[in-house]
Image (tube, grey):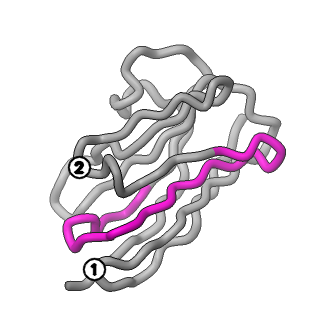
Amino acid sequence: QVRLVGSGGGVVQAGDSLRLSCAASGRTFSGYAMGWFRQAPGKARDFVAAIIWSSSSTYYADSVKGRFTISRDNAENTVYLQMNSLKPEDTAVYYCAATNYYTPNLNLRAHYTYWGQGTQVTVSS
């Protein structure tokens, strides 16, 4: 069993930066990929970014390309989401997720087995 604990959210102004962290505990994560999703009030949980653990290949939603960077630290079993040039529309609860199995669709939340508890990011204009 893998437990994911997300952190790093907060309240910032437009143009600021934040870094989210997601630590995997319970056992050494040796799965396929980890990702970040976000859910704004009244909206669906949408894909933000994903990273394949073995290759560090990364994937991003169009809305965050060029502003957000996903990375991972093998030794710490942790994935990060560096968010720069934040916009009010980035306001949401951010969830990290993990999957042990190959999937060609890392943007689909149904393909992830483990989920963190969510961390709130609020960007004021």
Which residue occupies 51% across, 55% down? Answer: 81
Check the image and report above or below for 84 versus 36. below
- Decide: marks 2, 1 in contact (CB < 8 A)? no
The quadrant in which the C terminus is found is: bottom left
Q: Does the magenta stretch include residue 21?
A: no
Check the image and report above or below for 123 versus 66. below
Mark carried by residue 63? 2
Q: What residue type is labelled 2?
A: Ser
Mark carried by residue 36? none
Secondary structure beneath disc 1? Answer: loop
Which residue occupies 48% across, 71% down? Answer: 18
Start and end of the magenta stretch? 72-94
Marks 2/1: CA–CA distance: 15 Å
The quadrant holding residue 11 is bottom left
Q: In this view, does 114 lie to the left or right of 12?
A: right
- The image position of residue 100, as x and y in percent, is 62, 23
Secondary structure beneath disc 2? Answer: loop
Q: Does the magenta stretch include residue 93?
A: yes
Mark carried by residue 14? 1
